Image (cartoon, helix red, strand yellow):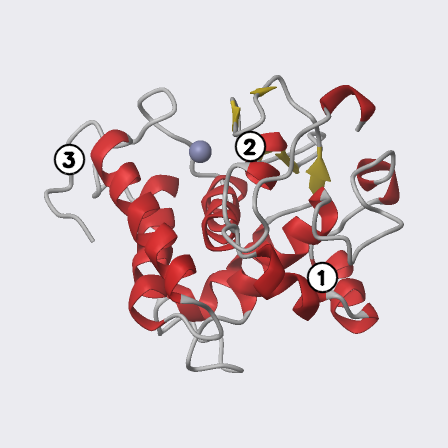
Amino acid sequence: MASCTVTVPDLDASGDNLYGPRICSQDFVDWAWDAFDFDKGDWDGGFGYSSACDNTLPLSRTMSAIWCLSFSSPNLPRESYSSNILEWGGRFARNTIDELDARCGTSSCSPRSCSGTIAKTRSGGIFVDAWTRLYLPFFYNQGVSVRASTLIHEARHADGKGHNRGDNDSSWEYNGAWRWEVAWLSWFVGEGQNTSTAMREQARQEANNILNTNFETHPGFNI
Ligand SMILES: [Zn+2]
């Protein structure tokens, strides 16, 4: 990551001190590595390949997002599609995201924050390699619960549904990635388990930011 050096924000505020120890197990890392098809070549060179427990590095911070996405429902271990997105979101993301890659991206980082593209997904097709790439703002500008919601957003893209108004969606009814992200966040606010008040509050704020800025027609409610 020599070319994308960052200042790591407060680890308590981002939730990385809460979730980091949970992902720091060979069993979990092996499971997530396989389920999301990580490759060494996309996570070495400073992204954390050889230090999965270092919660200042992108790999740990991504693993924490996967943990949060996978283990926040009160109904676990059930992951039924007849229930809400908090319950089945992890299953959906595992099944749709083809591979998760770390990149620096084109963002610029100040000591306080990084701005720019958070994540990008190419959904693939015949002769097209599918991938989801995660950039610096994903690792360092989002707390763990918001990172989890970004994964469900990208999973919706991986499933083939793009945005229809630039990087925004036309409406709630369009049922795009922004709606899915808001839905996951709002269920997390209401029912999220194994988390903290701070993580829930960040989720609520992110849901409202999205509702207020990423729909051409405002859905008409806030969380
Ligand atoms: Zn998107």
Around disc 2, counting alpha carbons within 10 Å, would you say few (fewer than 14), some (14 to 19), or many (20 or more)?
many
Q: Is residue 217 left or right of residue 28?
A: left
Disc 1 residue type (three-letter): Ala
Q: Is residue 179 left or right of residue 158?
A: left
What's the distance in space between the residues labelled 3 and 1, CA to CA?
36 Å
Circles 3 and 1 in contact, beta carbons < 8 Å: no
What's the distance in space between the residues labelled 3 and 2, CA to CA?
25 Å
What's the distance in space between the residues labelled 2 and 1, CA to CA?
21 Å
Mark 3 highlights which residue?
A: 218
Q: Is residue 201 left or right of residue 157?
A: left
Residue reaching furthest to the left: 220
Mark 1 highlights which residue?
A: 32
Q: Earlier in the sequence, mark 3 or mark 1?
A: 1
Q: Tell me where residue 106 appears, x and y as whole percent.
A: 62, 17
Around disc 3, counting alpha carbons within 10 Å, would you say few (fewer than 14), some (14 to 19), or many (20 or more)?
some
Circles 3 and 2 in contact, beta carbons < 8 Å: no
Closer to the camera in the image, 1 or 179: 1
Residue under the point 52% across and 29% down: 113
Secondary element type, mark 2: helix
Residue under the point 58% across and 26% down: 111
From the Cβ of disc 2, is ligand 1 less than 8 Å away?
no
Closer to the camera in the image, 159 or 216: 216
Residue under the point 50% across and 42% down: 142
Disc 2 residue type (three-letter): Pro
Mark nearer the viewer, 2 or 1: 2
Q: Tell me where residue 107 appears, x and y as whole percent.
A: 58, 20
Which label sits on residue 137? 2
Q: Earlier in the sequence, mark 2 or mark 1?
A: 1
Which label sits on residue 100? none
